[in-house]
Image: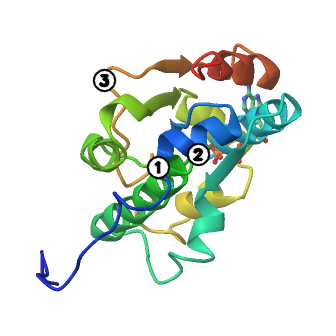
């Protein structure tokens, strides 16, 4: 793939700006990025937070792992290269929503520091708020929401995060949620504090 193309002339400066969109929506756009093991609670918390914010009159979009992998990213697998491309596209999509003033809730395993750095770079440091859904592997495995841990232990799934593929905890996240100790509602309340009124 070519890195740059002289025939491409973006018109970002001519379309309605993010500031104007934010004024229309009466909110500030931002991206909350939930990272953690499968079954840690990312989707559950994002859903609860979306509903809460929606009820308060905010304009919100959830981007969620399996939704994206069943659509725009259906041609990608789980090799490290594909995981990276998965997150690169998601971050670009999140940025499009961000530019329209939307509050974007991204819930993706996004297992390595490098992958999340890439997302942060695309989205922009000020708008990328990393939330570590810090649920121990033993609990995620006990929950086994989708039966995937059982399959991974049986060798039916290769390269499963936490089993035979690495998960690197964030170094300096905006928020850490220990879901074994607090309720879903409390998790979403904590995350909501990262959104500017
Ligand atoms: P992920 O999106 O990280 O793969 P899910 O949200 O699909 O995880 O699954 C998390 C599971 O853990 C759900 O069944 C949820 O009800 C349960 N759970 C228990 N306590 C919590 C909590 N405090 N926060 C989030 N999920 C929780």
Disc tally is 3
Quadrant location of the C terminus? top right
Residue at horizontal 43 percent and vertical 75 percent from the top: 77
In the displayed structure, 167 sits above or below 154; it is above
Nearest to the observer: residue 133 or residue 28: 28
Residue at horizontal 14 percent and vertical 81 percent from the top: 5
Label 3: how many residues lie within 10 Å, few (<14), some (14-19) or many (20+)? Answer: few
User: SS at mark 1?
Assistant: loop
Contact, mark 2 vs mark 3 (Cβ under 8 Å): no
Report whether residue 40 is seen. no
Residue 28, horizontal then vertical, whole percent: 57, 31
In the displayed structure, 177 sits above or below 82; it is above
The label on residue 21 is 2
Contact, mark 2 vs mark 1 (Cβ under 8 Å): yes
Contact, mark 1 vs mark 3 (Cβ under 8 Å): no
First along the sequence among labels 1 and 3: 1
Residue at horizontal 67 percent and vertical 37 percent from the top: 41
Drawn side of residue 53 relative to residue 75, left or right: right
Distance between the alpha carbons at the discs numbered 2 and 3:
33 Å
Query: Given this view, does label 1 or label 3 mark the residue nearer the observer?
Result: 1
First along the sequence among labels 2 and 3: 2
Residue at horizontal 45 percent and vertical 31 percent from the top: 130
Q: Which residue is mark 3?
A: 171
Distance between the alpha carbons at the discs numbered 2 and 1:
6 Å
Residue 12, horizontal then vertical, whole percent: 35, 61
User: SS at mark 2?
Assistant: helix
Drawn side of residue 91 relative to residue 11, left or right: right
Q: Which residue is mark 1?
A: 17
Quadrant location of the N terminus? bottom left
Assign ligand 1 to one image quadrant: top right
User: SS at mark 3?
Assistant: loop
Residue 156, horizontal then vertical, whole percent: 54, 72
């Amino acid at each position: 793939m070519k890195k740059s193309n002289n025939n491409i002339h973006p018109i970002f400066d001519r379309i309605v700006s993010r500031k104007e969109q934010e004024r229309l929506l009466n909110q500030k756009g931002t991206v909350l990025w939930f990272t953690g093991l499968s079954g840690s609670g990312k989707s559950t918390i994002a859903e609860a937070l979306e509903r809460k914010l929606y009820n308060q009159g905010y304009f919100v979009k959830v981007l969620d792992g399996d939704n994206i992998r069943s659509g725009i990213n259906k041609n990608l697998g789980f090799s490290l290269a594909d995981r990276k491309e998965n997150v690169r596209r998601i971050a670009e999509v999140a940025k499009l929503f961000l530019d329209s003033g939307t509050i974007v809730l991204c819930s993706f395993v996004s297992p390595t520091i490098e992958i999340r750095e890439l997302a942060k770079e695309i989205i922009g440091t000020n708008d990328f708020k990393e939330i570590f859904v810090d649920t121990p592997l033993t609990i995620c495995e006990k929950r086994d929401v989708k039966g995937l841990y059982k399959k991974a232990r049986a060798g039916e799934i290769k390269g499963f995060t936490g089993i035979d593929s690495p998960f690197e905890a964030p170094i300096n996240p905006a928020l850490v949620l220990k879901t074994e100790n607090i309720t879903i509602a409390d998790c979403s309340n904590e995350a909501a504090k990262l959104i500017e009124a």
